[in-house]
Image: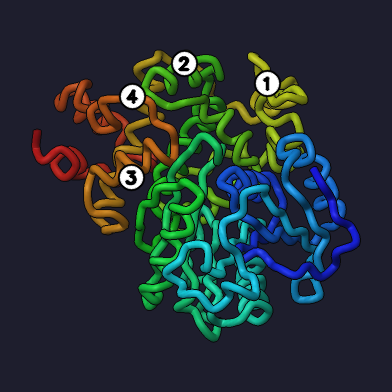
Amino acid sequence: MNTDRQAQTPATTPNIYLIGGGVVGKAILAAHLQAGCPVALSDQNPELLRSVTAQFAQSFPDVRIVEAASLGNELPTLHFWPPTEPKGKTPENQNESDSDPGGIRLAIESITEKKEAKRSLLSQLQSWLGKETILCSNTSTLPIHTLTDHLEAPEKVCGMHFFMPVDKRPLVEIVIPKGVAEKTIQNAVQHATRIGKPTLPVADSPGFVVNRMLSPYINEALLLLGEGASAEQIEQVSREFGMPMSPLELIDWIGPRTAFDAGRVYWQAFPKRIDPAPILTGMVKSKKTGRGSGEGFYSYSGEGERSKELAPAAAELIQRYSRHPRAWTHPEIRAQLFLPMLIEADLILADQVVTTTDEIETAMRGGLGFEDPSGFFSAFRAWGKADLAEDLYQRRERRSFSSSDGVLKRVFGGV
């Protein structure tokens, strides 16, 4: 990798800005570079940017990095130039139409999942980059309108939600807030397509589609741990149903803190539908940050290989938060994990976040990596409607099952 440390003001500037160089931000950066798309990466932590430079020297040896002027005179910035560069902003093409994907000026923020931090950053970006720049938030749960109601040009902001691991999850949710300009959405979709990501348009609602379905799933997995189910059972059942990994490993990919913040948004939006598992709070307090640091629920080698057993600290934490443990059968675990997702899918359709079961299937495959080729809903049909109805009825006292009235009729059309 060539690093130009003298070029403080390069003759050209990438049209694409990425704010936040954490675990998810680096994954989004890699997706751009793999697509040959130049990117300006900014982060408030210069040490983090130095570590990004060292890391990408290994994974992208042909990419040239330029130390650029700080964005807004505040955020240290690096420019990444792949060897094959789509047209960026140069003196020759800077006036080209925005219909050219390479001419879109667009910024993606991927900072901490904190509303006030995102609101402040979006305001700064609109000031620094101008009101014509498309701003996209990679928030996983926060409604976009709650981040933009103070901006001069909120119509230039939408959601662009990537999924971890980014290189294995092709989908991007494009979140459409009320009042957004049609051109904003068109440009966001064009850009996602440019980097090889198919898009799913979703309404501006807490958690959108994927994370709204994911929140009760993750929470139930953690409740099961505290009630006596083993991590091995939970992994086996989830994999057999079609999930690509254990929900505990998924938390390690996302990061316990981010998973906690996302769960809190879900709880604040739907407080009667979730009983938050204390284990995740304990994990955040333990400062185990997941795969990025080498330890969360599992331990990870320098190459990212996961331990077979739970990390000792995680096992101790689970024991500390255990309550009324008992033996669990695999069918019981399956019902606890996946019926809340089915209920949430029904409510998503009722709320018109998306309007068809096909869109739910797209979200499950592209956002969560669901592997059963017959599809998410077909997995429930295989249970039989009578057994599903009985499983729902038996668990009606649990909060995550409290909104199950009519789910079979609405999702399955009475079949």
Residue 388 left/right relative to 239: left
Q: Which residue is mark 1?
A: 305
Confirm whether residue 273 shows in the render. Answer: no
Q: Which residue is mark 3?
A: 344
The dot on residue 372 is 4
Q: Position of residue 176 (x, y in %)?
A: 39, 65
**Amino acid at circle 1:** Glu
The answer to whether the residue labelled 1 contacts the one labelled 3, judged by CB atoms less than 8 Å apart, is: no
Vertical relation: 189 (above or below) 298: below
Residue depth check, mark 2 versus mark 4: number of the one nearer the observer: 4
Residue drawn at the location 57% of the way across and 62% of the way down? 87
Alpha carbon separation for disc pair 3 and 4: 19 Å
Q: Quadrant of the C terminus?
A: top left
**Amino acid at circle 3:** Glu
Residue 75 left/right relative to 266: right
* Label 3 residue SS: helix
* Label 2 residue SS: helix
In the rendered structure, which disc, 1 or 2, sits on the residue that comes first in sequence? 2
Vertical relation: 231 (above or below) 342: above
**Amino acid at circle 2:** Gln
